[in-house]
């Protein structure tokens, strides 16, 4: 998992983040949003394994939006048609809701995203039909909101068949984070000036 400054784009084959078989990139989008927002899963204080625990709802508290993007290098001819990346991120404020279906990601790019400075895949030609998580079929993506006692940690386990697209998730977090990275994480310390999250660990191939 790598937190970056807002990229120029998060398209398939993105020049903004670059492709990676091992890294899920994340960045902060909007802050202090007051509008009620429908989400694919409303985090309510218990551990949730998506797709099994998907629970649509509406976030009513003031929130910040964060965006996570996995875009592996093409696997053509390498004998490994499926790419997998896992990672974990812990916020300093509670996770309120998750948006991970393609149509809903596209519908919220304009209000929660950083358009026009960051280009999102918001037309079929740039991959909106497959940008969200797949919750059925042979290659199921899993997003585990390990909210437990603190409701602040999100674990990713993402698969992409044939490395031909992207997987993306928008995370709504309570506004007002004061961030102190975990002292045990050298990666987190190197990202201290970016703010917003703590408890990073590198993604890895399954």
Image (cartoon, rainbow, N blue to C red):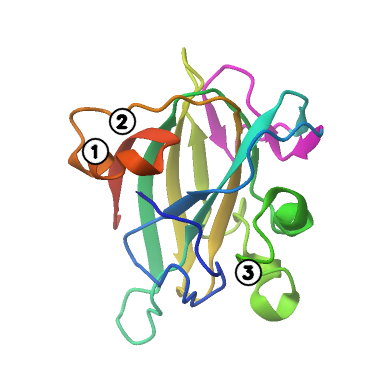
Q: Residue at x 46, y 67 (%)?
A: 71
Report the Cα–Cα distance between label 2 and label 1: 6 Å
User: Which segment did they paint magenta?
Assistant: 36-55
Res. 119 mark: 3
Q: Residue at x 59, y 58 (%)?
A: 137
Q: Quadrant of residue 62?
A: top right
Q: Earlier in the sequence, mark 2 or mark 1?
A: 2
Q: Earlier in the sequence, mark 3 or mark 2?
A: 3
Q: Residue at x 61, y 50 (%)?
A: 135
Helix, strand or loop at label 3? It is loop
Question: Vertical placement of 84 versus 128: above or below?
Answer: above
Q: Quadrant of residue 184?
A: top left
Q: Where in the figure is residue 98, as x and y percent of width and height? A: 63, 39
Q: Residues within 10 Å of mark 2 (few under 14, many from 20)?
A: many
Q: Earlier in the sequence, mark 1 or mark 3?
A: 3
Q: Residues within 10 Å of mark 1 (few under 14, many from 20)?
A: some
Residue designated by label 2: 181
Q: Where in the figure is residue 52, as x and y percent of width and height? A: 60, 36
Tell me if label 2 and label 1 are in contact, CB under 8 Å.
Answer: yes
Check residue 40 for magenta coloring.
Answer: yes
Q: Viewed as shown, does residue 45 lie left or right of 56?
A: left
Q: Residue at x 45, y 24 (%)?
A: 178
Helix, strand or loop at label 2? It is loop
Residue designated by label 1: 189
| Prevalent SS, magenta region | loop
Q: Viewed as shown, does residue 2 lie left or right of 10?
A: left
Which one is in front, 60 or 158? 60
Question: Vertical placement of 9 versus 13: above or below?
Answer: above
Which one is in front, 133 or 69? 69
């Amino acid at each position: 998992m790598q937190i970056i400054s807002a990229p120029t784009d998060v398209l398939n084959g993105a020049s903004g983040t670059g492709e990676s078989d091992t890294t899920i990139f994340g960045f902060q989008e909007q802050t202090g949003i007051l509008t009620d927002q429908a989400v694919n899963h409303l985090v309510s204080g218990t551990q949730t394994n998506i797709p099994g625990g998907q629970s649509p709802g509406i976030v009513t508290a003031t929130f910040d939006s964060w965006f996570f993007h996995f875009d592996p290098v093409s696997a053509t001819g390498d004998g490994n048609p499926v790419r997998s990346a896992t990672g974990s991120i812990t916020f300093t404020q509670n996770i309120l809701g998750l948006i991970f279906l393609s149509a809903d990601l596209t519908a919220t790019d304009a209000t929660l995203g950083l358009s026009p400075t960051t280009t999102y895949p918001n037309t079929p030609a740039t991959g909106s039909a497959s940008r969200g998580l797949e919750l059925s079929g042979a290659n199921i993506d899993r997003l585990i909101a390990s909210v437990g006692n603190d409701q602040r940690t999100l674990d990713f386990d993402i698969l992409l068949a044939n490395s031909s697209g992207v997987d993306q998730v928008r995370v709504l977090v309570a506004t007002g984070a004061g961030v102190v990275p975990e002292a045990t994480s050298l990666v987190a310390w190197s990202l201290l000036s970016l703010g917003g999250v703590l408890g990073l660990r590198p993604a890895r191939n399954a």
